[in-house]
Amino acid sequence: MKLFDRENTRRSAFVTATILFVMLANFSLLAQDTFSIVAVDSVTGEIGSAGASCVGSSTTYPHGAAILSDVIPGIGAIHTQAAWLSSNQQHAHDWMMLGLSPQQIIDSLVAHDAGGNPTTRQYGIVDYNGGHPRSAAYTGINCMNYKNDSAHLNFSIQGNILLGQKILDSMQSRFLGTPGSLADRLMAALQGAKIIGADTRCAPRNTSSQSAFLRVAKLTNQPDSLYLDLWMAYPQNQAGIYPVDPIDSLQTLYDAWKQVVSVRPAGNLPISSVKVYSDQDGNTVFDFTRCPEYPGATLVIYDVTGRKVRLEKVSSRILKLNLREVNHGMLIYQVADKRGSMMVSGKFFR
């Protein structure tokens, strides 16, 4: 009988340890140590979202930290972070579409948490409200330190598992002190957080984070086609030192994007566009049918770190490229005419 009791005790201890291990493993997948900002420009009606995290790209998070961002053109932006659950994010979206204010949405999220534990969540929400923006933030007491938030009239900044309050203060200072568009100010806010170990789990990687994103919507945009939608993420399982801080890679992509949007077509010329797709042989095909000045143009392709991976002269309407040596994921392309003027830019995935 004593032997039986001892065997049961050992089995019980093993089962308990196994359950605890699984719970901790699941927590590590869900926990998001993140710093982020949502903001509204009440004059232009633009709504923006930016952030970074020591979460990489994976099946769960295809674009890394960008999974926490929900930008609804003309209405508002929602960040659901720390122990992220898709159900909470969807509920917040639905309540915003019903017209609830940011504070009402947060109150509802806390009262009806999908996982039954709102103390581990963090939220930042802002809405346009017909040109009279409102914001609200929430940080659960059981989010991992350092954690805090700062909600103001037209923006909200929040973060958890941070190096300290200076990360949030620097983001706010850069956002308020930078001239230019909403996108310029959001990018500046992220640069304010670019300190090694800003997200403390990335300190061994010698970076602030593992992924970063910047998204801005105009009033007339569709939710799945924002005016600006950029992200950079190292793979979740990538080990060692990261070669470039994700925020710097995002800055490179943003600078390239700005060059393109600053170009306006002359006279009544149609806006150029390029169709990009993969053929049955695995080649990446660029179709310049709607880019009338393609002869003599230059096509440049960048990866998400801002590194130039291919440069090609365009001499025919259809250009097929073998990009098998380039890592899978998002790539950015730019097309300049023979005079060097930017004609068109875009992104594609392989």
Image (cartoon, rainbow, N blue to C red):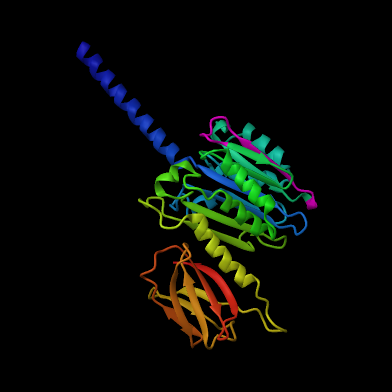
Image point (57%, 82%), residue name: 340
Image point (41%, 57%), residue name: 243
Image height check: is 81 above or below 302? Answer: above
Read off the magenta span: 130-147
Is residue 80 or residue 223 the one in the foreground? 80
Is residue 37 or residue 107 the one in the foreground? 37
Image point (56%, 80%), residue name: 336
Rendered-image quadrant of the N terminus: top left
Count of numbered marks: 0
Is residue 188 or residue 183 the one in the foreground? 188
Image quadrant in which you'd find residue 235: bottom left
- Position of 103 with respect to 117 (left or right) is right
- Position of 14 with respect to 246 (left or right) is left
Rendered-image quadrant of the C terminus: bottom left
Residue 316 picture location, percent across and down: 49, 88
Residue 128 picture location, percent across and down: 74, 51
Image point (58%, 50%), residue name: 192
Q: Residue furthest top?
A: 1
Residue 343 picture location, percent across and down: 60, 78
Residue 225 visible at all: no
Residue 194 picture location, percent across and down: 53, 50
Asked if the stretch drawn in magenta spans residue 132, the answer is yes
- Position of 24 with respect to 48 (left or right) is left
Image height check: is 278 above or below 234? Answer: below
Q: Residue furthest left?
A: 3
Residue 42 visible at all: yes
Asked if the stretch drawn in magenta spans residue 169, the answer is no
